Amino acid sequence: MLSLVLILLLSYLIGSIPSSVWLGKMVHGVDVRDYGSNNAGATNAFRVLGWKVGSSALIIDMGKGALAAGWIATLRIDTIPALGAWELDTVVALLAGLAAIVGHMFPLYLSFDGGKGVATTAGVLLAITPVTMLLVIAIFAGVLLTTGFVSLASMLSAVAFPIIVGAQIFIFGTGLDLSVFVVGLLLAVGIVVAHRSNIKRLRAGEENRFTSFKPAQGMIGRGELD
């Protein structure tokens, strides 16, 4: 069990890396949490700091999840006992990914006040079931291009994931482990709950919307920061 403890601890610490905050301070001397939506995630980094920092933060956040599920989960210093009827390696990868997501949302380095975990979740699931995630990414892009709402695209793609996995398992018999479906459901619920403030703004017509998909200058590029 020491292996599992090590995997979860390392995954949480990797997930805790606050890419948007650290990049904003290093590149521009700006704490992204002081502007825009006041969130420590990549979306707010795009909004406040522009596409270069925003895309870098997005890649790092996805990479945290992929690293946890794809590599840290393989570390072994002793034997991990079977975890029920589910496939062991898949379950360990999911647990490592969940630890990274928790780290992103409740980071040790930011007094446990982080982002919403969408990009890190995408990285986890991309490492575990890339074909499914390519479909989910297509749904995300379609919703974003159609509506301009990142929050809505995030929630709908999160809900789409367990639906697609369920179809693969129960209809097409692709061999995906049932644990992916169960965890996918939990993650979908968690992401929707994390976006409850966005849901309120969407209902009130006050949610931030992308009106142009040209490379974002951000508030700092437009000279709007002090």
Image (cartoon, rainbow, N blue to C red):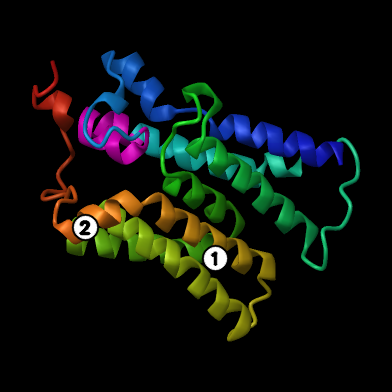
Q: Measuring from the top left, give residue 68's x and y in whole percent.
A: 62, 41
Q: Nearer the viewer, mark 2 or mark 1?
A: 2
Identify which residue is drawn at 28% across, 32% down.
Answer: 38
Quarter the N terminus occupies: top right
Which residues are the magenta region?
A: 40-55
Q: Measuring from the top left, give residue 139's x and y in whole percent.
A: 35, 66
First reached walking from the N terminus: tag 2 or tag 1:
1
Dominant SS type (magenta): helix
In this rendering, is residue 51 above or below 195?
above
Q: Secondary structure at mark 1?
A: helix
In this rendering, is residue 10 above or below 174?
above
Q: Quick check: 85 left or right of 46?
A: right
Residue hosting label 1: 185
Per the rendering, the mark at residue 202 is 2
Q: Residue furthest bottom?
A: 171
**Disc 2 residue crowd, few under 14, some 14–19, many 20+, Cα 10 Å:** some
